[in-house]
Image (cartoon, grey):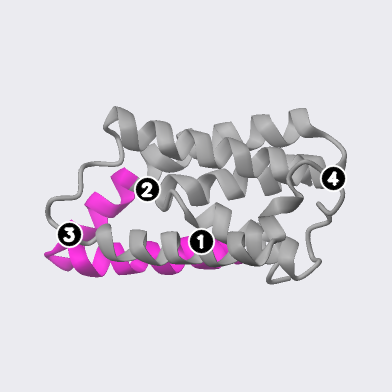
């Protein structure tokens, strides 16, 4: 179960870089994800919740701008790998297997970046423009993030 959950949160990172962090931050803050007393307990602090929420909202807006680079360029791809892996580690720390969480988050971030770049391109072709495809991807990222973080059961 942990490997699947970590893979799912990694997929979310592949869609939206900051989304896993905001979801996990809220989950820790609401005592859904047990990280209190660990090195990642800071995720549940009010300042972290506000920071990650603002960052995720800013990303949702920035993603729609025509100047936003492809998620497959090295800096963007790297950031998704970092946040997906970190989120997987957080889930693993809470579940007792950091290695499984790390592997799942890493694999999910790589797969999610490539899969959802392709899917968004296909959806943009179906819709005839990118904005509806981007909004559809937002909904999927939020829904999957809520489930993978434990915020929605």
First-in-chain label (2 vs 3):
3
Circle 2 residue? 116
Q: Quadrant of residue 10?
A: top right
Q: Main secondary structure of the magenta part?
A: helix
Label 3's element? loop
Label 1's element? helix
In-front residue for pair 52/71? 52
Crowding at mark 1 (Cα within 10 Å: few <14, some 14-19, many 20+): some
Residue 79, image x, y percentages? 42, 37
Image depth: mark 2 or mark 3 in front: 3
Q: CA distance from mark 1 to mark 4?
A: 25 Å
Q: Quadrant of residue 138?
A: bottom left
First-in-chain label (2 vs 4):
4
Residue drawn at the location 20% of the way across and 59% of the way down: 124
In-front residue for pair 32/111? 32
Crowding at mark 4 (Cα within 10 Å: few <14, some 14-19, many 20+): some
Residue drawn at the location 51% of the way across and 52% of the way down: 12
In-front residue for pair 133/13? 13
Image depth: mark 1 or mark 3 in front: 1
Circle 1 residue? 51
Left or right position of 68 against 94: left
First-in-chain label (1 vs 4):
1
Crowding at mark 3 (Cα within 10 Å: few <14, some 14-19, many 20+): few
């Amino acid at each position: 179960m942990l490997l699947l959950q970590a893979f799912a949160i990694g997929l979310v990172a592949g869609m939206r870089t900051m989304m896993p962090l905001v979801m996990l931050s809220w989950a820790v803050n609401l005592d859904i994800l047990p990280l209190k007393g660990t090195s990642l307990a800071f995720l549940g602090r009010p300042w972290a919740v506000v920071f990650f929420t603002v960052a995720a909202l800013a990303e949702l807006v920035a993603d729609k701008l025509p100047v936003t680079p492809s998620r497959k360029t090295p800096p963007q791809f790297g950031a998704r790998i970092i946040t997906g892996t970190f989120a997987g580690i957080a889930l693993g720390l809470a579940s007792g297997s950091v290695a499984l969480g790390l592997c799942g988050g890493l694999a999910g971030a790589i797969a999610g970046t490539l899969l959802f770049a392709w899917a968004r391109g296909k959806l943009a072709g179906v819709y005839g423009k990118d904005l509806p495809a981007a909004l559809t991807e937002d909904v999927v990222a939020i829904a999957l993030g809520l489930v993978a973080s434990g915020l929605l059961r």
